[in-house]
């Protein structure tokens, strides 16, 4: 189903609710291979609900219908020298396909890129939503202003809920000016532990680091790993801050500087997990950990199945690629420890058989089931997508 | 006056037994029942409203909080969570049949991890206490509500508190990693952790700002940030509100992200100047305080750019702080704004709507007209970067008619904020104060959904009853 208006989408959901007929909810379907496969005969796509509905550059807000392609939003912002703050990844390098992600898909999955470490996640910039419940009722939460604590924050509840608690139809985001320029430092380090220490030193400096990633051995011809540190600001500030960061990081190894073009290209690749070089048949996981827990987790994954690794967010985000097997998944779950994991991409059979997210405590799962019953009483929206 | 629900008579009748039960659950010094010792808990920062609670408990551990909640749940007793009691919306106002759970004794900093840039603290640690614990190493906790010397992190989480630096650093919700959260059934849940972006539903985001409707937070894991090298402010004064508003638009449009961008109208400038002698221009209709961060050279560069932008709007005067002391002097008046208004009026109501920033001139004009109509003076402070407007309505609490008019004036301002595309509250919360205005912002069905989500956490509606949701709805629900 391809509703062209919110009313049509509501009518389709009402009919599905009346018939107790499950619906797969998607935008352009770029992330179908993410999390668990949805068991639904029919698909409701929001991609025809498209277009920017409000953009006030001086108020730092943009609203668009859920099916608006992300590149359209990025282009509109770029025309006013602004950008999406969380730097969401382009799913195509990892998931394949031609169509770009939609705004609704990126918000529904709460996907954030390298800038997340300094400026917050997608969920931090969702100011308002319009959405449809599983009974086809429209509701709003938040609004179009930057500061709003009126009532329960259902924006955050639906962001990252992967379409299981409602169908987003329109989203308002906070945006920010694009920095005048950017640049990066790169330094080679003997191992991941040293790399994370270097990134912590950079993030613990007063120099406004907006990207802190680690490319471990196996990327290209490098041995050891390469730490990357980015600054985005006015040109004079970028120069100054990279100078000072070079001093901060000098004790860790020899520091090379990347000018804007090289820096932008490299961070785009990190954003889209390209340095992970995941083969098409391999599974991909994302782990979120306190950075200092990352070296041990990476070592365990290396021992378990020779994992390919890419670290972002100062070491707190660990991308993992490896065999699409239950044994590898068990090793990832163990390595996540007190942090969290997502089975980000895998063949359908594996995703259907395994927990793709950590289990919740029973009392929290019970609350979750009650909240789900409020917003989707017949359980027709993306059933099984997050948990069995 | 906003009505409180009638107390449950059978709970009031069992008060001695309830006090005795609580005294068995908690150490003797953690249960308060004598009227003289309950008195300090009868109100919060919204002092026009007062109500003595059934009892106050002051637990020291999460387990004690859980024990009290289990008991209250089993016995159908309402519960009001309380931090420092600084809520400006009556979020911690007691009910006659409710046990107040005060978290001020849970004031330990449990862990500081600078390598991973987080701290785990108990709910009763003050906002400033977190920064004090890490500032020697150059770190800080970003949200900085004006009450930060007193207010506690547990209350900050419950109200999703903001501050003057939100444009750059965000509000409480943007600076948290995890919580220890106790449900009304007394279940202790760990939400999030010490990592970013927990997988699954964003319970952390839903609980933050839920005003005690969903459960009680006993421990908080906050993100710590490295402080910038320095910060400095400037002020620019204009002879019209519209022109000052255009200057704000031009600054934001230039690509600079000031760490703070504050607006004061003429009555506010006068009140603050009389109070703080900060050297504010008394002939101005509007004044901006703009703060930037970085090294000295970076501050100079950005202040220079902002100065050039402001110069295009024919300012009456501009003053760039040359030193940290001059910067403090510029801030002194603004930070004392509420106290300054308190000096020229016996009482004031501090409103907290948010508006799209471009609507400021029109909204201030309408507020001026309302002020004349109600016969009550008003001074306006505005977080111009994020649209959060604080009109301070001056009145005399000893005159019931004056208070009634002030409340009506405030409601009309907040209704206007919603009409122009904004919201009822940017950072103070709904509490009791704005409860009955929720229908202005939300449809009946939207409120019904929010209430149903509360019910998913608190089916018996025992948690912070009579706040956030219009009372009529609760009565209907109970019927």
Image: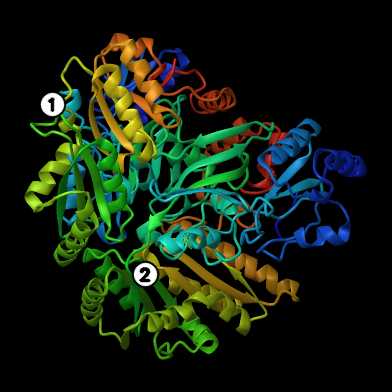
Query: Up-down: is B133 above or below A254?
Result: below
Query: Up-down: is B411 above or below B13?
Result: below
Residue nearest the observer in this picture, B74 or B381: B74
What colouring style does the render use?
Answer: rainbow
Residue nearest the observer in this picture, B346 or B31: B31
Query: Up-down: is B111 above or below B140?
Result: above
Position of residue B114 measured from the top left corner of the image (x, y, whole percent):
41, 51
Position of residue A95 measured from the top left corner of the image (x, y, whole percent):
20, 24
**Image point 24% across, 47% down: which residue?**
A211
Q: Around disc 1, counting alpha carbons within 10 Å, would you say few (fewer than 14), some (14 to 19), or many (20 or more)?
A: few
* Label annotation for residue B261: 2
| In-image side of B255 versus B213 (left or right) | left
Can residue B185 be seen? yes
| In-image side of A172 versus A227 (left or right) | right
How far apart in space, not on screen, are marks 2 and 1 (Cα)?
43 Å
Position of residue A54 measured from the top left corner of the image (x, y, whole percent):
28, 50
Chain letter of disc 1? A
Position of residue B226 measured from the top left corner of the image (x, y, whole percent):
37, 58
| In-image side of B161 versus A221 (left or right) | right
Chain letter of disc 2? B
Callout 2 and callout 1 share a chain? no
* Label annotation for residue A185: none
**Image point 33% across, 24% down: which residue?**
A300
Quadrant assignment for the C terminus of chain A: top left
**Image point 22% across, 78% down: which residue?**
B304
* Label annotation for residue A98: 1
Can residue A286 be seen? no
Q: Around disc 2, counting alpha carbons within 10 Å, would you say few (fewer than 14), some (14 to 19), or many (20 or more)?
A: many
Name the element at disc 1: loop
Quadrant assignment for the N terminus of chain A: top left
Whether pointer 2 and pointer 1 mark residues with C-beta atoms closer than 8 Å, the reply is no
């Amino acid at each position: 189903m391809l509703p062209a208006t919110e009313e049509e989408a509501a009518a389709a959901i009402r009919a599905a609710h009346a018939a107790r007929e499950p619906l797969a909810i998607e935008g352009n379907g770029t992330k179908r291979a993410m999390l668990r496969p949805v068991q639904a005969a029919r698909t409701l796509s929001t991609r025809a609900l498209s277009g920017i509905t409000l953009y006030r550059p001086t108020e730092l807000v943009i609203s668009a219908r859920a099916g608006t392609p992300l590149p359209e939003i990025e282009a509109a912002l770029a025309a006013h020298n602004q950008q999406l703050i969380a730097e969401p990844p382009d799913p195509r390098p990892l998931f394949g396909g031609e169509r770009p992600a939609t705004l609704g898909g990126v918000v529904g999955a709460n996907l954030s890129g390298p800038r997340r470490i300094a400026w917050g996640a997608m969920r931090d910039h969702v100011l308002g939503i319009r959405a449809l419940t599983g009974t086809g009722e429209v509701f709003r939460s938040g609004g179009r202003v930057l500061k709003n604590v009126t009532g329960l924050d259902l924006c955050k509840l639906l962001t990252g809920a992967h379409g299981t608690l409602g169908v987003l139809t329109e989203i308002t985001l906070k945006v920010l000016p694009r920095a005048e320029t950017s640049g990066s430092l790169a330094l080679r380090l003997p191992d991941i532990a040293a790399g994370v220490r270097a990134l912590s030193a950079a993030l613990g400096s007063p120099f406004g680091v907006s990207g802190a990633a680690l490319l471990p051995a196996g990327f290209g011809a490098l041995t050891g790993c390469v730490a990357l540190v980015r600054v985005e600001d006015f040109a004079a500030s970028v120069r100054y801050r990279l100078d000072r960061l070079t001093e901060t990081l000098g004790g860790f190894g020899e520091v090379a500087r990347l000018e804007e073009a090289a820096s932008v290209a490299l961070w785009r690749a990190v954003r889209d997990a390209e340095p992970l070089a995941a083969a098409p048949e391999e599974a991909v996981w994302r782990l979120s950990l306190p950075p200092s827990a990352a070296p041990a987790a990476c070592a365990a994954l290396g021992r378990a199945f020779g994992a390919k690794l890419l670290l972002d967010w100062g070491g707190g985000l660990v991308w993992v690629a490896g065999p699409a097997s239950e044994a590898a998944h068990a090793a990832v779950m163990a390595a996540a420890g007190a942090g969290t994991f997502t089975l980000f991409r895998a063949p359908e059979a594996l995703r259907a058989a395994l927990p793709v997210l950590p289990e919740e405590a029973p009392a929290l799962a019970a609350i979750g089931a009650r909240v789900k019953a409020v917003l989707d009483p017949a359980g027709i929206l993306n059933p099984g997508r997050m948990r069995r | 006056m906003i009505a409180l629900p009638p107390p449950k008579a059978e709970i009031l009748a069992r008060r001695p037994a309830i006090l005795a039960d609580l005294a068995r659950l908690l150490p003797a010094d953690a249960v308060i029942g004598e009227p003289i010792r309950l008195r300090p808990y009868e109100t919060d920062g919204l002092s026009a409203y007062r109500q003595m609670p059934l009892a106050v408990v002051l637990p020291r551990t999460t387990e004690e909080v859980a024990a009290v909640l289990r008991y209250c749940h089993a016995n159908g007793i309402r519960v009001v969570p309380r931090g420092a009691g600084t809520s400006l919306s009556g979020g911690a106002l007691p009910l006659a049949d409710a046990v107040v759970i005060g978290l001020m004794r849970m004031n330990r900093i449990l862990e500081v991890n600078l390598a991973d840039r987080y701290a785990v603290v108990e709910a009763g640690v003050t906002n400033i206490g977190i920064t004090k614990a890490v500032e020697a190493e150059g770190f800080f906790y970003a949200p900085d509500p004006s009450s930060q010397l007193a207010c506690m992190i547990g209350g900050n989480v419950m109200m999703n508190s903001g501050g003057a630096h939100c444009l750059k650093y965000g509000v409480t919700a943007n600076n948290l990693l995890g919580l220890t959260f106790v449900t009304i059934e007394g279940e202790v849940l760990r939400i999030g952790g010490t990592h970013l972006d927990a997988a699954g539903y964003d319970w952390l985001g839903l609980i933050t700002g839920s005003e005690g409707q969903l459960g009680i937070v006993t421990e908080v894991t906050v993100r710590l940030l490295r402080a910038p090298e320095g910060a400095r402010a400037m002020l620019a004064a204009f002879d019209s509100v519209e022109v000052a508003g255009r200057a704000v638009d031009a600054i934001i449009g230039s690509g600079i992200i000031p760490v703070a961008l504050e607006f004061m109208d003429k009555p506010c400038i006068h009140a603050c100047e009389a109070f703080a002698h900060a050297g504010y221009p008394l002939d101005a209709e509007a004044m901006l305080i703009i703060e930037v961060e970085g090294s000295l050279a970076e501050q100079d560069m950005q202040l220079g750019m902002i100065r050039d932008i402001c110069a295009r709007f024919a300012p009456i005067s501009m003053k760039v702080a040359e030193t940290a002391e001059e910067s403090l002097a510029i801030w002194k008046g603004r930070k004392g704004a509420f106290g300054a208004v308190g000096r020229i009026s016996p009482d004031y109501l501090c409103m907290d709507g948010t508006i799209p920033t471009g609507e400021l001139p029109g909204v201030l004009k309408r507020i001026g007209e309302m002020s004349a109509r109600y016969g009550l003076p008003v001074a306006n402070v505005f977080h111009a970067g994020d649209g959060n407007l604080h009109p301070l309505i001056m009145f005399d609490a000893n005159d019931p008619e004056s208070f009634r008019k002030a409340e009506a004036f405030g409601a009309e301002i907040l209704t206007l904020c919603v009409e122009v595309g904004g919201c009822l509250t940017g950072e103070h919360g709904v509490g009791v104060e704005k409860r009955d205005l929720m229908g202005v912002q939300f449809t009946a069905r939207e409120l019904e959904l929010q209430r149903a989500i509360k019910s998913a956490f608190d089916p018996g509606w025992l948690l912070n009853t009579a706040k956030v949701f219009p009372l009529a709805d609760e009565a209907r629900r109970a019927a």
